[in-house]
Amino acid sequence: MYAVIKTGGKQYVVEPGQVLKVEKLNLPEGSEVEFEALLVRDDSSVKVGDEAKGYKVKATVVRHGKGKKIIVFKYKKKKHYQRKYGHRQHFTELQINEIVS
């Protein structure tokens, strides 16, 4: 069984027992969070839209952190313009517990 959830403007395919990195959620570590399922797939059927409305995905916040550094380099030839800076995106790691109806 798996489901599709939406958080942080992105959609993720999740299964029970999976560990997932999403955009930072303002929740303490160890707390429970619930997401609405957009799509649910059982062994025999697929439920989408209104059919999947009653399904919830329960997850636990494992930890918060920062991703790998991304280097941003801007350059304009013949104009002596260069800018270099880095960015590290904050994330929340979730442990998917169960998909319930």
Image (cartoon, grey):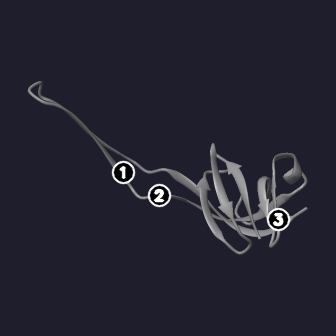
The residue under label 1 is which amino acid type?
Ile
Q: Rounded to the nearest whole Å, what is the CA distance between mark 3 and mark 2?
A: 37 Å
Query: Which quadrant of the view contains residue 22?
Result: bottom right
Residue in the foreground of this view, choosing between 30 and 72: 72
- The structure residue drawn at horizontal position 67% and vertical position 51%, both measured from the top left corner, is 25
Q: Which mark is in front, 3 or 2?
A: 3
> Residue 58: x, y in percent?
80, 63
User: Is residue 45 among the parts visible in the rendering?
Assistant: yes
Give the answer, above or below, for where 101 lies relative to 17. above
Answer with mark 3 or mark 1, whichever residue precedes in sequence.
3
Query: Which quadrant of the view contains residue 74?
Result: top left
Residue sitting at the far top? 79
Q: Is residue 27 left or right of residue 87?
A: right
> Residue 19: x, y in percent?
64, 70
Residue in the foreground of this view, choosing between 94 and 26: 94
Residue highlighted by disc 2: 67
- The structure residue drawn at horizontal position 80% and vertical position 73%, both measured from the top left corner, is 43
> Residue 49: x, y in percent?
81, 47
- Is disc 2 in contact with disc 1, using a CB cutoff of under 8 Å? yes
Residue highlighted by disc 3: 45
Q: Is residue 99 left or right of residue 70?
A: right
Q: Which mark is residue 70?
A: 1
- The structure residue drawn at horizontal position 77% and vertical position 55%, both measured from the top left corner, is 39
Q: SS of the residue at dot 3?
A: loop
Q: Is residue 37 left or right of residue 93?
A: right
